[in-house]
Amino acid sequence: MARVLLFGRLADQAGWREREVEALDLSTLRASIARTDPDLAGALVAPGVQVAVDKAIVRGEAALSPASEVAFLPPMSGG
């Protein structure tokens, strides 16, 4: 099972920071989250949200292993 991490407002919205999810790739992982929390699923694909798989930012699809760590990072701001 992939380890899913949420940070910042995404964790606040979900009500959790870390969870295990059975998924072979990012699209399957997102579909699994959408079944249980459609609002969170929408937030995870919002502009500026980045995804890191095993600590590397990915764009688009990525394969996952049972040992994968998937982190959803909210848009950064600051100065």
Image: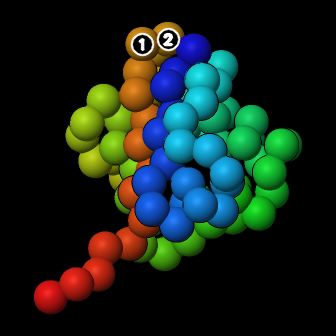
Distance Cα–Cα, label 1 vs label 2: 4 Å
Q: Residue at x 42, y 13 (%)?
A: 67
What x and y, as percent, mark residue 62?
A: 43, 34
User: Which residue extends farthest left?
Assistant: 79
Residue 24 shows in the view: no
User: Are the residues at dot 1 and dot 2 in contact (C-beta closer than 8 Å)?
Assistant: yes
Mark 2, secondary structure of its residue: loop
Disc 1 designates what residue?
67
Residue drawn at point x = 49 percent, y = 25 percent: 3
17 or 73, nearer to the observer: 17
The kind of residue on which mark 2 rests is Pro
Q: Which residue is nearer to you in this view: 14 or 49?
A: 14
Whether 41 is drawn above or below 16: the answer is below
Instruction: Depth check: give the residue in front, 58 or 43.
Output: 43
Check disc 1 and give the amino acid type. Ala
Q: Looking at the image, which residue is at 49% across and 48% down?
A: 6
Task: Quickly name the residue at label 2.
Answer: 66
Q: Secondary structure at mark 1?
A: loop
